[in-house]
Every structure is written in structure tokens, then in C-alpha cells.
Image (cartoon, rainbow, N blue to C red):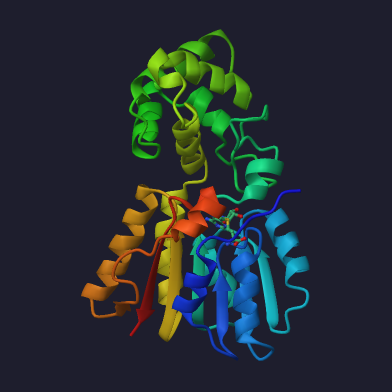
Amino acid sequence: MTTHIPVLLKETIEGLNPEKGETALDATLGGGGHSRALCARIGESGTFIGVDADEDAVLRAKEILSPCKARVILETANFRTIARILDNHGIKAINRAVFDLGLSSFQLEESNRGFSFQRSEPLLMTFEKNAPQEAVTAYDIVNQWREDSLEAILLGYGEERFARRIAKAIVSARREKPITSTDELVSVIVQALPWSYRNKRLHPATKTFQALRIAANDELGALKEGLFECFSRLAPRGRMAVISFHSGEDRIVKLFFKEQKNAGAAILISKKPIIPSREEQRENPKSRSAQLRILEKI
Ligand SMILES: C[S@@+](CC[C@H](N)C(=O)[O-])C[C@H]1O[C@@H](n2cnc3c(N)ncnc32)[C@H](O)[C@@H]1O
């Protein structure tokens, strides 16, 4: 059975330091790990707002948070629309907020949406379970984007050193027939790489899959908007915590926090990013690349 182990849980809750009666937001419900801990701290007089783009995460949270005594509001939505969600519920300000970015173990292992290169699944990679017709999917990117755009995302979002070779191989393969599944894509990637690169510890498709997922969900665009909206609704002395998993995300968080600090609008609770202890990394290898930053509004 799949479980999602919350990353940097103790450090996030200690850093946010939520108190009884406060309003807390979890912008990325996932498996509900951080939500449960936040809810327990704000108690029955608190208000909890949980958001996830994936309706399965929201359904899961409903169950996990059923013992929670706080007022609980759950929304299937993109966190770039936080302000509208708060408006819809008449909530003016929040005291604590967490963003735990990327995808959950449930999405990786059970969603059948093509996040994993270890299964044969359709190439979707959308966080939304029932993405609208017009949503960009990994299939669209792989089969329709120009070679130079493919190369750019593999390089920019995946830091894939063989971006050019992989982009070329994808375009050449799709001339024969569309690439429709994860295993077809994996085989195109593997064949594009030099032999010496095929048996490394990191699976050769890891970076390409990361890049496609980020592009399909416009993850960096959503993050910029989500951080801005969340900060604008943070109460004075309110805190927000962001856990990122790759350098592209962390750069955005670091810059946003620095801008608020330089503008005299916030202080940094963590001067440097907090990373998982060796013990956590050993117990949960998925936590290895995590970096936590926390800010307090003045
Ligand atoms: C790493 S998981 C969160 C795990 C959670 N903190 C826990 O401990 O169980 C990330 C979640 O964020 C969601 N997500 C990512 N980007 C999002 C966005 N822009 N808007 C809403 N949800 C998003 C994903 O669907 C996924 O469920």
C-alpha cells in the first residue's frame, strides 16, 4: 500500500510555530501529513484551509482530517488562486502557511498519469486528476513542441546534460508515430544516450520526466503566483514555509523571500535552507533533495 512520508515535518511545524485559534493554510495537501500536524496545533478554535490540484489528495485529506476539531475547508484548486479561495470563504488573513512542492508518492505510484518511468502509463503528468481538455499534457509537449523548446525545458527544468540528443531523438521518433506512453518515451531516451550513461545510479529518464512534469503543470509559474498571493494574505507576524525539491524551485523561493526582506516586509526565520537530517534521508530517500525556507511577515 502506498504511503507518503511527510518531508521535514518536525522542522516545518517547529519553524511555523502554529498556535491555538490561528488560521493555517496547506497549499499542497498531498498525503495530508503536514495538514494533520498543523490542524492538531491550531485546535478547535482554529481554521484550516487545505488546497491541492489533485482531487484524490483532497478526498484523502477529508478522511485524514476527519478527527480534526478545527473548522476545515478543503478545495481542489491550483495554489496560484489562493486569494480567490480565501475570498470565497470570507477569510481575510492567514497566520501560517506551508507549500510542500512537487508530487506525492500517491501520484507517482498509483495515479496512472505517467509520472513514473518505471511503469507503462499514458503520458499525462498533470497534477489535476481530471484535467480540462485544453490542459497541456506531457503527450502534447513530447509530440507537438518544437525541438528547440524541448531542448530548452530539458536543460532548464531537468538540468539534463544530454538535452540536445534527447530532444532530437524525440522529434525523430515521433515522425514515425506519436509517443503515447511512458515506456515508449523511456526507450527513446535510453537509446539517445551514450552507453556509458545508461547504467548510472540515476535512471536515465529521471531528468527528462522531471522537466516534462514541471512544464506540463507550469510549476514555476504557479509557484511565483502562489508565493505572491500567499504573502499578500499573510497576517502581520504570520509565517510561511516552503519545501522545494530542485534548484529551479529553490531559486524562486530564495529570491522571493530576499525581495520581501530587502523591502523591509519580512524577516527570514531560516537564514540558510534547512535540509533533512542524515537519519531522515536514510529513512526516506525521497527527502534527499528537500530544502525548507521559512519567512515571517513584519
Ligand atoms: C509533495 S506533495 C505534498 C505532501 C504533503 N505535504 C504531505 O505531507 O503529505 C505535493 C502536492 O502538491 C500538489 N501540487 C503541486 N503543485 C500544485 C499547485 N500549483 N496547486 C495545487 N496543488 C499542487 C500535488 O498535487 C501534490 O499532491
In the depicted structure, whether residue 126 falls above or below residue 23: above
In the depicted structure, whether residue 278 falls above or below residue 48: above
Q: Nearer the viewer, residue 19 or 122?
A: 19
Horizontally, residue 255 falls left or right of residue 32, namely left
Q: Residue at x 69, y 53 (%)?
A: 3
Viewer can see residue 112: yes
Q: Nearer the viewer, residue 207 or 231?
A: 207
Q: Residue at x 44, y 26 (%)?
A: 200
In the depicted structure, whether residue 211 falls above or below residue 175: below
Residue 65, image x and y in percent? 73, 72
Residue 139, image x and y in percent? 57, 29
Residue 1, image x and y in percent? 76, 48
Horizontally, residue 207 falls left or right of residue 272, namely right
- Residue situated furthest top in the rendering: 176
The image quarter containing residue 136 is: top right
Viewer can see residue 89: no
Residue 5, image x and y in percent? 61, 57
Q: Nearer the viewer, residue 32 or 237?
A: 32
Q: Residue at x 39, y 34 (%)?
A: 153
Q: Quadrant of the C terminus?
A: bottom left
In the depicted structure, whether residue 89 falls above or below residue 184: below
Q: Quadrant of ligand 1?
A: bottom right
Report the number of discs: 0
The image quarter containing residue 42 is: bottom right
